[in-house]
Amino acid sequence: AQSVTQPDIHITVSEGASLELRCNYSYGATPYLFWYVQSPGQGLQLLLKYFSGDTLVQGIKGFEAEFKRSQSSFNLRKPSVHWSDAAEYFCAVGAGSGGYQKVTFGTGTKLQVIP
Amino acid sequence: GAVVSQHPSWVICKSGTSVKIECRSLDFQATTMFWYRQFPKQSLMLMATSNEGSKATYEQGVEKDKFLINHASLTLSTLTVTSAHPEDSSFYICSALEGGGYGYTFGSGTRLTVV
């Protein structure tokens, strides 16, 4: 079965600073990888996803993520954080076949942005 | 883009009553929908997979008789929490799988409080 680890429960960065959120996955084959963002009391919004091809994926809101098979990682990055980026971020892995993917979420990383 | 509407956003009910939560795909047909539960400050836990026209597949430890899932059409799945108790209070989120199996869109979630 697949699993996802987000080692950082809570991260604080200054507005304008760069950001990297870590995500490691475990799955026997090439996984489908996702990053979602959740604002308090809200649902999840997809930031980006990786299925195949270029290992550097561009997403919305200026986020990008890089798939590194050798490290089983899919870290999320943003060069300059804005106060509105404060939220909880979830990495997820989809695994399965036949067009159906069972998605497993990491425990999330809460991002705090300070002025 | 794909939109999933979840209703209601907030619900408070008395212990022992039943609550129905709706999940609708607004601009696409969803043969598969997923129901998640999220406890405070925790990740999303998959409860069940809902397939149009067939019985839902429940994850281990999820009570089928307590969490009734009906996926009667290609755009609507419902989750009914039967005989709700305070420990059922949680944030419930649905997601729908787009046609090609490569996209997951989430609803905005339902905050259930059982008093």
Image (spheres, coloured by chain):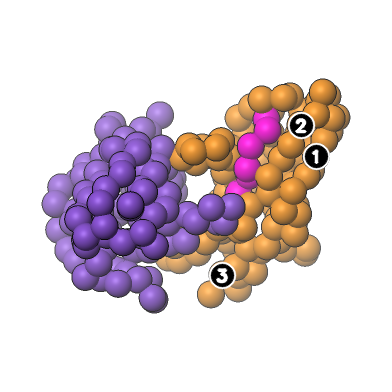
Chain colours: A orange, B purple
Tell which subunit mark 3 falls on: A
Residue B98 drawn above or below residue A97: above
Q: Residue A44, image x and y in percent?
A: 49, 41
Q: Are marks 1 and 2 in contact (CB under 8 Å)?
A: yes
Taking depth in this image into account, of B99 and A36 the one nearest to the observer is A36
Residue visible at 35% across and 38% down? B10
Residue A96 at x, y percent in the picture: 45, 66
Residue that label 1 marks: A12
Q: Is residue B99 above or below residue A40?
A: below
Disc 1 secondary structure class: strand
What is the secondary structure assignment of the residue under circle 3? Answer: loop
Label 1 neighbour load within 10 Å: few <14, some 14-19, many 20+: few
The residue that disc 2 covers is A113
Can residue A58 be seen?
Answer: no
Mark 1 near mark 3, Cβ–Cβ under 8 Å? no
Q: Do the residues marked 1 and 3 share a common chain?
A: yes
Name the residue rendered at 39%, 62% in the picture. Answer: B87
Q: Which residues are magenta?
A: A85-92
Given the image, on which type of amino acid does mark 3 rest? Answer: Gln
Q: Can see residue B75?
A: yes
Q: Say which chain tag 1 marks.
A: A
Magenta stretch, main secondary structure class: strand
- Dot 3 corresponds to which residue? A2
x, y percentage for residue A111? Answer: 71, 40
